[in-house]
Image (spheres, rainbow, N blue to C red):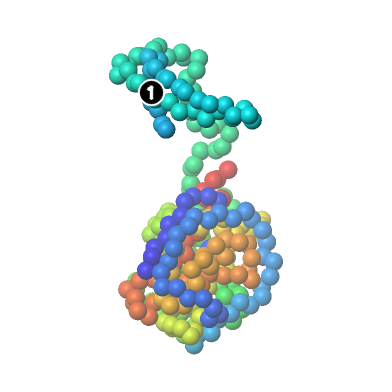
Amino acid sequence: MHVHRLGLALAVLTACGPDGRADATDTSPTTQPGTTAPTSTSSSSGDVAPTTTGDASTTTTTTGTTDATGTTAVTGTTDVDTTTTTEPVDPSTTTTVGPKLDLPPEMPIPVKDIPGLMSITFYESTSGVMQYTFLIDGPELNNLLPDPLSNANRDIEGTSVEFYDVYYSDVDGVFDPLGSYLTIAGSFGAKLPAGGGLNLAEISLNFDDNVFEFGSFLASYVGLGDNYIMGSEPNAIDNNLDTHTTMGNTVDTPGQRLRVTLGFKSSLMPG
């Protein structure tokens, strides 16, 4: 199992097609362009089944020959004087690197404190794109469910062996009710030839003026098992509901969770 973490910038789930396999995760920070409306609700389903040195006192002796074309071959020896000379620095030639003033400072805020935010939707792909919407102050996003996840202990259920927990978090997917990121994490109990689980198409922030915002920053993730498709993670922030992540299964790692953590421009670069 590899845990991946990505840098800052500007994420549901379930079994996908049986193509591709990997046993570990990989991390590569990925940033996608900003907000756009869903363009489709098409299904993307799965199935459960010489160098010289010297100073001003150095003496160099050079010999050479010039051919008809004017090319000169030069060989030489350098006698280095070990005396060092210190000269005053001209202030006019000194460069000072200062802070950039054309970009706003990094001032992340809790997702739930984003002005005008009403709810959050997780788009999960199991036999088609399903939408799961939660209020920003609801119990789902503000609590971390204990393991093991099950039909009676989950926020989202994909198949009969696929259960997910959604919550506010930090960049590493650690639960934080005042976190600036959103995480979906969970378990999937089917190995190959079944497609991998946690098929996250997108996560959207839904505002009171009917505007919404998709995730723009793939913060970190965990993929496990033989049906994890490495490299599918950026699909969670490509503003395309026809694509999704495929994070694998937890059959051989029951104490661990598949996970995708996303960041949003509105919480990471407010204003």
Residue at the extreme right of the image, as rendered? 39
Q: Is residue 257 above or below residue 18?
A: above
Q: Is residue 90 left or right of residue 123?
A: left
Mark 1 highlights which residue? 78
Rendered location of residue 14, percent (x, y):
51, 77
Residue at the extreme bottom of the image, as rendered? 49
Count of marks, rendered view: 1
Nearer-the-camera pick, 138 or 251 = 251
**Residue neighbourhood size for the residue with mark 1, other residues' Cα within 10 Å, grouped as few (<14), some (14–19), many (≥20):** some
Which part of the image, by quadrant, shows the C terminus? top right
Which part of the image, by quadrant, shows the N terminus? bottom left
Amino acid type of disc 1?
A: Thr
Rendered location of residue 221, percent (x, y):
44, 63
Residue visible at 62% across and 54% down in the picture? 33
Residue 167 lies in quadrant: bottom left
Q: Is residue 136 above or below residue 156?
A: above
Residue visible at 48% across and 46% down in the picture? 108
Rendered location of residue 47, percent (x, y):
53, 84
